[in-house]
C-alpha cells in the first residue's frame, strides 16, 4: 500500500509518499510567501502549493491508496459559504487577542481548564474569533466555517467541512472528554456553534477527491482523504511518543511532547499544555519554550555569524562549572509558567568567557528550560524512560551532546527526520485499517537508534544553578 502525506507549515509545505512499513519516498517541499504581516498568511496558498506538490508526486506515484493531512495549529481562518477565505489566515504566532484571552480566564477560568485542558492564551483560536467578532463583525458574519490549515486543504480536496480532536482542542472550546464542541459555552460567548465544523476522529476518511480537485492535483478522482491531525500530534506519533517516551524538538520554539492516559492531564493543567491526541487512547502534553531554537538564531545574528557557525563554536566549548547561565526567555517563559512576558537574562558572565562558551551556554539554557518541563511532567504524571531527539537543531552535534549530558532518559534518534509527515502516514494507514490502531501502526512504522550520550555530573550541577536563577527571574516579573 502507498499513502501520500501532506504537512502544511507556516514557512513551507512538504509532501511525501509512504508505504505501510514507514518507508518514505518522493519527498517534496515548497516555501510559502508571507502575507504583509509576519503573523498572517494567504490561505489560498495552502491549497495551491499543496496541489503543486501533489502533482509532482502523482507524476511518479500513480496509485496512492489515500492522502492524509497535517498542518500548523491555532490559526484563525474564516471560510464563507462559497468556500473562500474571508481574510488572510491569522497564524498561531499572533498574540493580539490578549484582551479576549484575559476575559475568558476572568469569566470562565476553572471551567475552561477543567473542560478544555488549558487556560486561554492569545495564540489559541477562540480568543482570536472573539476579537474578530468584536472588531471585524463583517468578517465574522461572512464566515460559515472556522477551519485550521489541514481542514481547509481537506475541504478543497473533498468539499467536506470537518475537523478532528487535535486541532479542535487547539482552538479552545472542545470538551476533552466528549471530543465535541461545548455548544452552550460558545453560545454564552455570543458565538454561533454552527460556524465550528463537525469533529470526527483523526484516523477517519473525511471524503474523496472531487473531479475539480483531481484536475488541480493529479490525484485520481475518488481517492480517499484522511483528515489526519494538527502538526503537534502528528509529530508526536511520528516520533514514537508514548506513555514511556517523550520527544524533544528545537525549531523556532523548543518543544517537549509527551502522552498520557485520557483524564491524566488534569494534574498538568496550567503547567503544561494539554490537548487531544490523534490516538484516542491518549492525551497529548506539550512543554514549550517560545524562543527555543530562535535563541540560537538570535545569538548568531547578534554576533554576525551563521547558524552553522554558531553550532560549530558551541561544540568547541566544554561543559564546565565556569559556564555562564542563559535564561532563554527572550520571547517569554512559556511552560511551565504560562507567562509570555520577555524576561531573558545572563547570569555569571565574566571577562574570561569567550564566544564558544556563550554559544554552548545558549544551547544549555534552552535545554534546561525543557528539562524543567520534563521534570514537572514526571513529578505529576510518572517517569519517562526514553527521550527522542527529533529533527532540526536536535541533530546538531553540540545539541546532541548537551542534551545527552543534561537529560536522564535513554536517548534515541529517529531514522526519519520528517516526524509530522511520518506521523500523518501512521494515522492514514490506521484509517485504511492496515493496522488495528495508531499504537500498532507506530510500532511497525517508527524506526530509531539509540545514542550513547550519558548524563554528566557537571551538567546536573549547571542545571541546579539554572533553576536557582530561574527563581530570580520569576521574582523580577
Image (tube, helix red, strand yellow):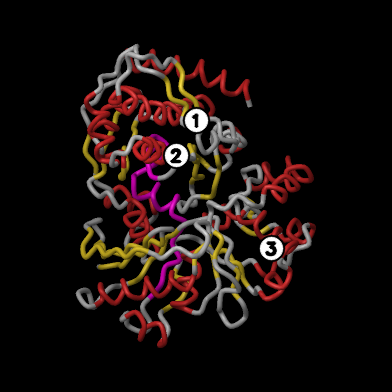
Characterize the local packing of mark 2: few (<14), some (14-19) or many (20 or more) Cα atoms within 10 angstroms.
many
In the displayed structure, 69 sits above or below 386; it is below
Q: Quadrant of residue 365?
A: top left
Q: Quadrant of residue 188?
A: bottom right
Circle 2 is placed at which residue position?
Answer: 258
* Front position among marks 3 and 2: 3
Circle 3 is placed at which residue position?
Answer: 132
Characterize the local packing of mark 1: few (<14), some (14-19) or many (20 or more) Cα atoms within 10 angstroms.
many
In the rendered image, residue 246 lying in the magenta stretch gets the answer: yes
- Tell me residue 288's x, y (percent): 49, 38
In the displayed structure, 339 sits above or below 361; it is below
- The residue drawn where x is 39% and y is 50% is 235
Label 3, label 1: how many angstroms apart (C-alpha)?
35 Å
State which quarter of the image contains the N terminus.
bottom left
Q: Which numbered tag is attached to residue 462?
A: none
Mark 2 or mark 1, earlier in chain: 2
Q: Which numbered tag is attached to residue 377?
A: 1
Q: Quadrant of residue 165?
A: bottom right
Query: Of helix, strand and loop, which one carries label 2?
Result: strand
- Tell me residue 388's x, y (percent): 32, 37
Dots 3 and 1: beta carbons under 8 Å?
no
* Front position among marks 3 and 1: 3
- The residue drawn where x is 55% and y is 41% is 273
Span shown in magenta: 224-251
Tell me: 330 left or right of 423: right
Can residue 256 be seen from the camera position used here? no
Dots 2 and 1: beta carbons under 8 Å?
yes
Label 3, label 2: how many angstroms apart (C-alpha)?
33 Å
Query: Of helix, strand and loop, which one carries label 3?
Result: helix
- The residue drawn where x is 53% and y is 51% is 93
Amino acid at each position: 500500500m502507498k499513502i501520500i502525506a501532506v504537512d502544511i507549515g507556516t514557512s513551507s509545505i512538504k509532501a511525501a509518499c509512504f508505504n505501510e512499513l514507514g518507508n518514505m519516498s518522493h519527498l517534496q517541499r515548497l516555501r510559502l510567501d508571507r502575507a504583509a504581516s509576519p503573523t498572517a498568511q494567504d490561505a489560498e496558498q495552502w491549497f495551491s502549493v499543496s496541489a503543486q506538490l501533489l502533482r509532482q508526486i502523482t507524476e511518479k506515484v500513480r496509485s496512492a491508496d489515500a492522502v492524509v493531512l497535517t498542518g500548523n495549529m491555532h490559526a484563525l481562518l474564516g471560510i464563507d459559504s462559497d468556500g473562500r477565505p474571508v481574510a488572510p489566515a491569522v497564524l498561531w504566532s499572533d498574540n493580539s487577542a490578549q484582551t479576549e484571552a484575559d476575559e475568558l480566564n476572568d469569566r470562565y477560568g476553572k471551567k475552561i481548564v477543567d473542560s478544555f485542558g488549558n487556560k486561554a492564551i492569545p495564540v489559541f483560536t477562540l480568543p482570536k474569533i472573539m476579537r474578530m467578532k468584536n472588531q471585524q463583525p463583517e468578517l465574522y458574519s461572512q464566515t460559515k466555517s472556522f477551519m485550521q490549515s489541514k481542514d481547509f486543504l481537506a475541504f478543497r480536496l473533498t468539499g467536506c467541512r470537518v475537523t478532528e480532536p487535535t486541532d479542535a482542542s487547539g482552538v479552545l472550546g472542545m470538551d476533552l472528554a466528549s471530543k465535541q464542541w461545548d455548544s452552550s459555552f460558545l453560545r454564552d460567548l455570543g458565538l454561533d456553534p454552527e460556524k465550528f465544523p463537525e469533529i470526527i476522529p483523526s484516523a477517519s476518511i473525511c471524503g474523496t477527491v472531487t473531479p475539480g480537485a483531481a484536475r488541480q492535483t493529479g490525484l485520481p478522482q475518488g481517492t480517499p482523504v484522511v483528515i489526519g491531525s494538527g502538526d503537534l500530534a502528528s509529530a508526536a506519533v511520528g516520533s514514537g511518543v508514548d506513555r514511556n517516551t517523550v520527544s524533544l524538538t528545537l525549531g523556532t520554539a523548543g518543544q517537549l511532547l509527551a502522552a498520557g492516559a485520557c483524564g491524566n492531564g488534569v494534574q498538568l493543567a496550567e503547567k503544561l499544555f494539554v490537548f487531544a491526541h490523534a490516538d484516542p487512547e491518549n492525551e497529548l502534553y506539550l512543554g514549550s519554550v517560545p524562543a527555543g531554537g530562535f535563541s540560537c538564531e538570535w545569538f548568531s545574528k547578534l554576533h554576525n555569524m551563521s547558524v552553522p557557525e554558531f553550532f560549530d563554536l558551541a561544540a568547541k566549548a566544554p561543559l564546565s562549572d565556569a559556564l555562564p547561565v542563559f535564561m532563554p526567555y527572550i520571547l517569554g517563559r512559556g511552560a511551565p509558567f504560562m507567562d509570555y512576558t520577555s524576561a531573558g537574562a545572563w547570569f555569571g558572565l565574566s571577562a574570561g568567557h569567550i564566544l564558544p562558551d556563550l554559544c554552548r551556554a545558549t544551547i544549555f539554557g534552552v535545554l534546561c528550560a525543557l528539562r524543567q518541563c520534563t521534570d514537572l511532567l514526571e513529578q505529576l504524571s510518572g517517569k519517562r524512560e526514553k527521550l527522542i531527539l527529533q529533527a532540526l537543531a536536535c541533530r546538531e552535534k553540540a545539541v546532541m551532546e548537551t542534551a545527552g549530558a543534561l537529560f536522564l532518559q535513554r536517548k534515541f534518534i529517529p531514522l526519519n527526520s520528517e516526524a509530522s509527515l511520518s506521523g500523518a502516514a501512521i494515522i492514514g494507514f490506521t484509517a485504511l485499517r492496515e493496522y488495528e490502531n495508531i499504537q500498532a501502526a507506530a510500532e511497525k512504522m517508527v524506526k530509531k537508534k539509540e545514542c550513547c550520550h550519558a548524563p554528566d555530573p557537571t551538567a546536573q550541577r549547571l542545571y541546579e544553578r539554572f533553576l536557582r536563577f530561574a527563581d530570580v527571574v520569576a521574582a523580577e516579573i
